[in-house]
């Protein structure tokens, strides 16, 4: 399965929100507290002085790089990307994050829709 980030989030207005990281979930109504699950390689990043996270550590791994960052208001997040990026990231640098694919799971089992209503978990 690989390494994943499990981020505390809230599902509201069709979005799973983990701090400033927002992931569209379609037309699903507000549900409340949830866990947002994102694989490390399903997050993209870009250097951005007004970004939502701060690089803490950069680890070269052969043909890819693992970036440990702190997502504002949430905590630790890990991103894996190819080495073909044009810019070298440094600890302390601000970055913007986006999720290519993610799943959101409501924390309260009573809020989980029937299996026939699987729109609450959506791969983007």
Image: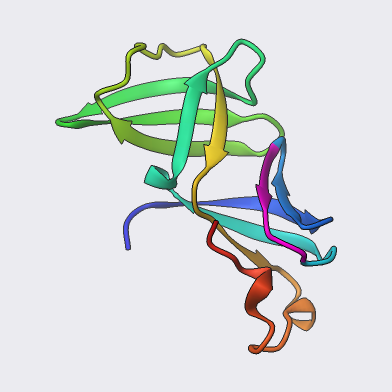
Indicate the position of residue 94 as horizontal and vertical percent values.
Answer: 56, 16
Indicate the position of residue 114 as horizontal and vertical percent values.
Answer: 70, 88
Location of residue 116 by image quarter:
bottom right
Tell me, yes or no, whether the highlighted magenta stretch contains residue 20: no
**Residue ID at (64%, 79%):** 118
**Residue ID at (68%, 52%):** 24
Left or right: 63 as drawn, with respect to 22: left
114 shown above or below 99 = below
117 shown above or below 5 = below
Q: Quadrant of the N terminus?
A: bottom left
Location of residue 83 by image quarter:
top left
Left or right: 100 as drawn, with respect to 117: left
Indicate the position of residue 88 as horizontal and vertical percent values.
Answer: 34, 11
Location of residue 48 by image quarter:
top right
27 shown above or below 114 = above
Give the number of marks: 0
94 shown above or below 63 = above
Give the magenta part as a residue range: 21-27
Indicate the position of residue 103 as horizontal and vertical percent values.
Answer: 56, 61
Q: Tell me, what colour scheme is on the image?
A: rainbow
**Residue ID at (59%, 65%):** 122
Nearer-the-camera pick, 41 or 26 = 26
Left or right: 82 as drawn, with respect to 114: left
Q: Quadrant of the C terminus?
A: bottom right
**Residue ID at (35%, 22%):** 58
For the view shown, which residue lies furthest in the left direction?
62
């Amino acid at each position: 399965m690989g390494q994943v980030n499990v981020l505390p989030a809230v599902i509201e207005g069709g979005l799973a929100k983990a701090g400033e990281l927002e992931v569209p979930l379609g037309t699903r109504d507000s549900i409340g507290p949830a866990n947002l699950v994102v694989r490390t390689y399903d997050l993209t990043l870009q250097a951005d002085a007004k970004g939502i996270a701060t690089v803490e550590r950069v680890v070269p791994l052969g043909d890819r790089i693992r970036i440990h960052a702190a997502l504002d208001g949430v905590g630790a997040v890990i991103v894996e990307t190819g080495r073909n990026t044009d810019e070298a990231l440094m600890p302390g640098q601000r970055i913007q994050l986006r999720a290519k694919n993610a799943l959101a799971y409501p924390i309260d089992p009573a809020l989980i829709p029937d299996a026939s209503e699987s729109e609450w978990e959506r791969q983007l």
